[in-house]
Amino acid sequence: NAGVTQTPKFRILKIGQSMTLQCAQDMNHNYMYWYRQDPGMGLKLIYYSVGAGITDKGEVPNGYNVSRSTTEDFPLRLELAAPSQTSVYFCASRTGQGGLEKLFFGSGTQLSVL
Amino acid sequence: DAKTTQPTSMDCAEGRAANLPCNHSTISGNEYVYWYRQIHSQGPQYIIHGLKNNETNEMASLIITEDRKSSTLILPHATLRDTAVYYCIVRFTMYSGGGADGLTFGKGTHLIIQP
């Protein structure tokens, strides 16, 4: 199993550009999450999904959109990129069994908006 | 979810046991204690979790006090590769009020293993 795969690893955007951060998992997990991490800080939840077709906002959803058309994929869309979106983005997934919070994380996407 | 308090940073000599404390004095009876770590530039990695009893796995041991108000993560023989930020998180399970909105990661403890 590859686990959670994120692409790209690095990206530089100009202000106002748009892009999609890709996240895929091959563990048949129902629950998927997008976090962002600013330098020296903890992780903040952007969006999450409890299954295909179901998404919900986290702590910092403004400026982002998500979709979940399949169990495997959970892309994060940035519209009209702003410097405040410069961050490292992590995708995570977990099984829903037992309700325990054993998350598997991807290796992250480092995004700079200039 | 109960709030946790961790030291900002700690040092430990390579080969020694690293003991990372976490205070969660307002923990409720059904809340679990989770530990994750984040090695520089990587995504967080699950280490261990517990409810009441002490737990051990191939990565670490988790010691929870009898009153559950604090816990200690023990890395028995620390190596340089254990240098990371360690997060202690307290959370209800999804089925007992925790919801599906995942874990909240604070600033954690920056553990530095010295050669």
Image: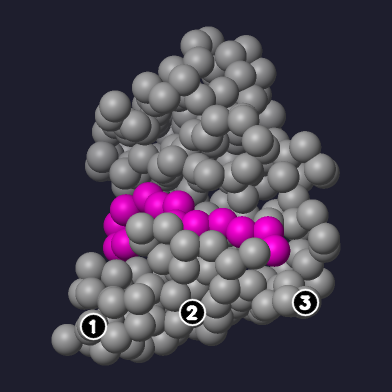
Mark 2 falls within which chain? B
Mark 3 falls within which chain? B
- Circle 3 packing at 10 Å, graded few (<14), some (14-19), many (20+), is few
What is the spatial separation of the Cα atoms under label 2 and label 3, in whole angstroms?
18 Å
Verify whether residue B115 appears in magenta.
Answer: no
Q: Earlier in the sequence, mark 1 or mark 2?
A: 1
What is the spatial separation of the Cα atoms under label 3 and label 1, in whole angstroms?
31 Å
Relative to A57, residue A39 above or below: below
Q: Amino acid at mark 1?
A: Gly
Assess whether mark 3 and mark 2 are in contact (beta carbons under 8 angstroms).
no
The magenta span reads B39-52
Relative to A89, residue B89 above or below: below
Q: Amino acid at mark 3?
A: Asp
Image position of B82 (left or right of A65): left
Q: Earlier in the sequence, mark 3 or mark 1?
A: 1
Judge if badges 2 and 3 mark residues of a common chain. yes
Mark 1 falls within which chain? B
> Which residue is label 3 attached to?
B67
What is the spatial separation of the Cα atoms under label 1 and label 2, in whole angstroms?
15 Å
Relative to B56, residue B68 above or below: below
> Which residue is label 1 attached to?
B15
Q: Earlier in the sequence, mark 2 or mark 3?
A: 2
- Residue nearer the viewer, A104 or B56: B56
Judge if badges 1 and 2 mark residues of a common chain. yes
Residue, x 23% and y 68% (percent of image)?
A: B81
Residue A76: image location, x then y, percent: 48, 29
Q: Quadrant of residue A12?
A: top left
> Which residue is label 2 attached to?
B20
Indicate the secondary structure of the residue bearing disc 3: loop
